[in-house]
Amino acid sequence: MEQQPTIWNPVAECMPREELLTLQLGQLQQTLMRVAENVPCYQGKFKEVGFNPGDLKDLSDLANLPFTTKEDLRLNYPYGMFAVPMRDVVRIHSSSGTTGKPTVVGYTKADLASWTELVARFMTAAGVTNEDIIHIAFGYGLFTGAFGLHYGSEAIGASVIPISGGNTDKQLMIMQDYRSSVLVCTPSYALTIADRMEKQGIAPESLALRVGLFGAEPWSEQMRVEIENRLGVIATDNYGLSEVMGPGVAGECLCKAGMHLAEDQFIAEIIDPDTCEVLPEGSVGELVLTSLTKQAFPMIRYRTRDITRLHYETCDCGRTFARMEKTRGRSDDMLIIKGVNVFPTQIEEVLFQIEGCQPHYQLVVERENNQDKLEVQVEVNEKIFFDEMKQQRAFVTEAEKKIHSALGLSVKVKLVEPSSITRHEGKACRVFDNRKN
Ligand SMILES: [Zn+2]
């Protein structure tokens, strides 16, 4: 039997950093030439700052270029940001826009090939092989998640079950009968599946599941532990966004020490989301990505709005690419309450440390008499919910105390009945900020 690789593309993924930086510079120069020639939006942006693509001599010069934002993509809807004629575009996807029109992205044949390669890389890094049966429970459609994982799985030689999202009972039946060994979905949907398994009395050992590839929303380390215990899988994180490519921009290896970012295809910067300045190595801030190889839809300094941190030391797995910490949330999801920055994942981490807490919660922000008030509504198990007041009170006090010491913020914790918070089959919706209404 042919030996399956543990690193999909060792030449790229384990490249010495010096060589990588030389490669990035050359590709960046070519990308800038291409967008300056073909994309009016970039022609305008470069003109505004008096930049000629030939001027870029060093990677540090990138910091002088303007950013690209979601707003730029909206203004150029639908095809204005494409750098190739439509005859060269073979696939169209769009991003899940919550407001206004979704943004449209395109791929040439070469773009699809590199996307597939990047997904195959992170799947392999998570231990997936051609022996696996991949259960893809992301919705198939304009969203990039399902198709990205689909083609990556096929490239590895694994068997794909394109079940798509929804209908959890059917998902479970297929998982049992077809012996799915790898689950692909959002982390919150993984917990919805776990809930249903418990309700139906399906033990995780009775399934063939061994690995979970979870992405498309931020999730905490505590949530990872919860999913691993309840589904009996190794749960790994991966990262991507449609505007930049889709899943495959970064993915975890089995060291679980951050997601390796495909630096042979993207340059990553971390900026202060308020001042827009590039922050020194090791800082927490907003991730900004520049594509190096994309043909149809190149992106220069795209503001992802995702808050994270990058680590550059070589990983124990041997890969040399920077490792990106789990995203803490989006800079637009960040709540500012009484001047304190709060991400939902920070509260989630605290809640998961408390006995009896269920992994379902939501945050409600109100403004009363010009004062911000944050209420954390959390599901607790039946034992606590139906127990005497004293015990409920103790739980609430503990949770409020722990959140206060972790975030420096006083919040009100409210216990809600098991299963009373709406379950989402796609992305979890955890924040209700009523101050804006
Ligand atoms: Zn690694």
Image (cartoon, rainbow, N blue to C red):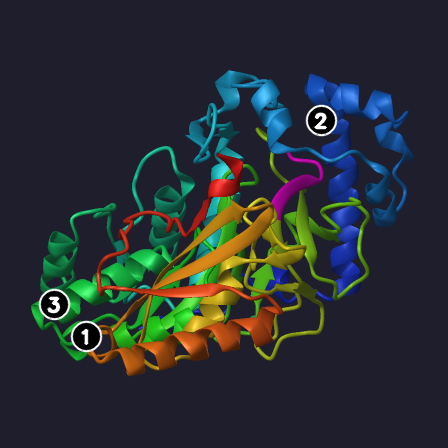
Report the magenta residues as a range: 298-305
Residue 132 lies in what quarter of the image? bottom left
What residue would you read off at disc 1? 386
Task: Tell me if mark 3 has few (under 14), some (14-19) or many (20+) residues whose alpha carbon lies within 10 angstroms of its own.
Answer: few
What residue would you read off at disc 2? 35
Q: In this view, does 270 lie to the left or right of 404?
A: right
Task: Tell me if mark 2 has few (under 14), some (14-19) or many (20+) residues whose alpha carbon lies within 10 angstroms of its own.
Answer: many
Q: Which of marks 3 and 1 is in front?
A: 1
What residue would you read off at disc 3? 199
Measure the alpha-carbon separation of dots 2 and 3.
54 Å
**Element marked by disc 2:** helix
Q: Earlier in the sequence, mark 3 or mark 1?
A: 3
Q: Which of marks 1 and 2 is in front?
A: 1
292 above or below 382?
above
Name the residue located 62 percent from the left edge and 69 percent from the top edge: 408
Q: The N terminus appears in which quarter of the rendering?
A: bottom left
Task: Tell me if mark 1 has few (under 14), some (14-19) or many (20+) residues whose alpha carbon lies within 10 angstroms of its own.
Answer: few
Give amino acid for label 2.
Val
Q: In this view, does 115 lie to the left or right of 48?
A: left
Give amino acid for label 3.
Lys
For residue 31, the mark is none
Residue 125 appears anywhere in the view: no
Q: Earlier in the sequence, mark 2 or mark 3?
A: 2
Q: Is residue 287 left or right of residue 53?
A: left
| Frontmost residue, 362 versus 303 | 362
Name the residue located 27 percent from the left edge and 78 percent from the top edge: 389
- Locate residue 74, reporting x and y percent: 57, 23
